[in-house]
Image (cartoon, helix red, strand yellow):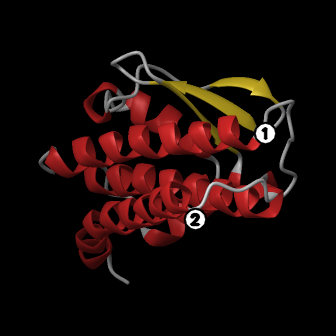
Amino acid sequence: MNKYLFQRTAKYWNDWACQSVKLVKDFLVSDITEDEPRFRSYYILLSYAFELMLKSRLVMVTNISEDELIKIYGHDVKKILQKLKDLNELKNIGIKDLPEVIKQYIYKIETTDSKIFYIYDFTNIRYYPKEDKDSWETANIILCTADIMLSISNKIRAIEVK
């Protein structure tokens, strides 16, 4: 795909990611469960959606090709966020600063309105870390993460392409 078409399609990635987040949110509202594999699936979907939102913005504000995006960034959310920070884009999309690694493969991210959410490294997410939380707390964490991600998605959508 040529760079022009690649950039044009990137604006839709954010919308596709947003739909995934809404899907997770809708399922959690209707079915609170203790099923750890289901939570793992939700985390995988949320983490990939977040990566897609970030890549959407990165492609919109750079002249990066599809091959370069794959080779340089892969699924490395931290590297994508670093590039967005270098471009002074983090605050535009509602992220305060680079993520903090709180455990191996788990990033803590703070928004510009002081909300905190956690993203799992997509390439290693299949090793879902069970902490001492009951299912309701875990479901609440996922729901809060979904709400924050929808807010970020809305900010990305509202920004005009440079």
Q: Earlier in the sequence, mark 1 or mark 2?
A: 2
Q: What residue is pinned by disc 1?
A: 105
Residue 16: which quarter of the image? bottom left
Q: Amino acid at mark 2?
A: Ile
| Side of 22 relative to 159 (left or right) | right
Q: Which mark is residue 70?
A: 2
Above or below for 120 versus 88? below
Foreground of the two, 32 or 44: 32
Q: Residue furthest top?
A: 114
| Side of 47 relative to 123 (left or right) | left
Instruction: Determine contact: label 1, label 2, CB under 8 Å.
Output: no
- Does dot 2 land on a helix, a strand or a loop? helix
Q: Amino acid at mark 1?
A: Tyr
Real-space CA distance between mark 1 and mark 2, rounded to the nearest whole angstrom: 20 Å
| Side of 28 relative to 63 (left or right) | right
The residue at the point 31 percent across, 72 percent down is: 3
Foreground of the two, 14 or 1: 14
Residue 8: which quarter of the image? bottom left
Foreground of the two, 13 or 33: 33
Residue 118: which quarter of the image? top right
The residue at the point 30 percent across, 35 percent down is: 93
- Does dot 1 land on a helix, a strand or a loop? loop
Q: Residue furthest bottom?
A: 1
Q: Which mark is residue 82?
A: none
- Determine if residue 20 is in view: yes
